[in-house]
Amino acid sequence: MIKRFCAQRGCNNLVDVGSRYCAAHSELGLKKEQERQRQYDNHVRLTRDAEYHEFYLSPKWEKMKSFISNKYRGLCLWSYYHEQSIAELEEIHHVKPLRIAWEKRLTIGNLIPLTHEFHMMVEAEYRKGNMLAMQRELWRLLSMWEREFGGRGG
């Protein structure tokens, strides 16, 4: 079975791919994740971003998420190429954000699978004003996958 590190910051315990936390952190991690999600839903999804929230609940998005997961074998491309490690995708990032390019929301070349940690890192770079450089890097990773695996998805 393929392993990955526990998602708890500073923990070096290994867990099976598909699990986020080791036994020591699973309950704590789950509670933290649920609270983070609740706060995000209340402050962002259900108020400011209702249109985007509806999109993320749509059958079209669910179908696209499944397609992307299969295409990239459930892997985070940042981990695969930058960390030379196998990490399960947890989120799918729009390279060009929905607010900027709504028309690209279901464009395969605008979607990249990432772990939550790397997704948050990418978003932080966007907020710091490094969006264009980060976008170029994400498109480079997508291109590397295509060169390495072609359209076969791995």
Image (spheres, helix red, strand yellow):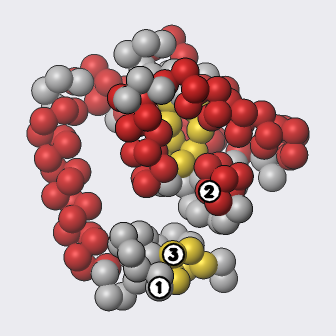
Q: CA distance from mark 2 to mark 1?
A: 17 Å
Circle number at residue 146: none
Tell me: 125 left or right of 25: right
Is disc 3 placed on a helix, strand or loop? strand
Q: Say which residue appears at 19% left-offset and 43% top-offset.
A: 40
Is disc 2 placed on a helix, strand or loop? helix
Q: Amino acid at mark 2?
A: Ser
Q: Is residue 46 above or below residue 85?
A: above
Tell me: 52 left or right of 32: right
Q: CA distance from mark 3 to mark 1?
A: 6 Å
Residue 81 x, y percent position in the rendering: 71, 52
Question: Does residue 69 appear in this view?
Answer: no
Q: Which residue is mark 1?
A: 13
Q: Say which residue appears at 55% left-offset and 79% top-offset.
A: 16
Question: Does residue 102 appear in this view?
Answer: yes
Q: Which residue is mark 2?
A: 79
Which callout, 2 or 1, points at the residue further toward the start of the chain?
Answer: 1
| Corner quadrant of residue 64 | top right
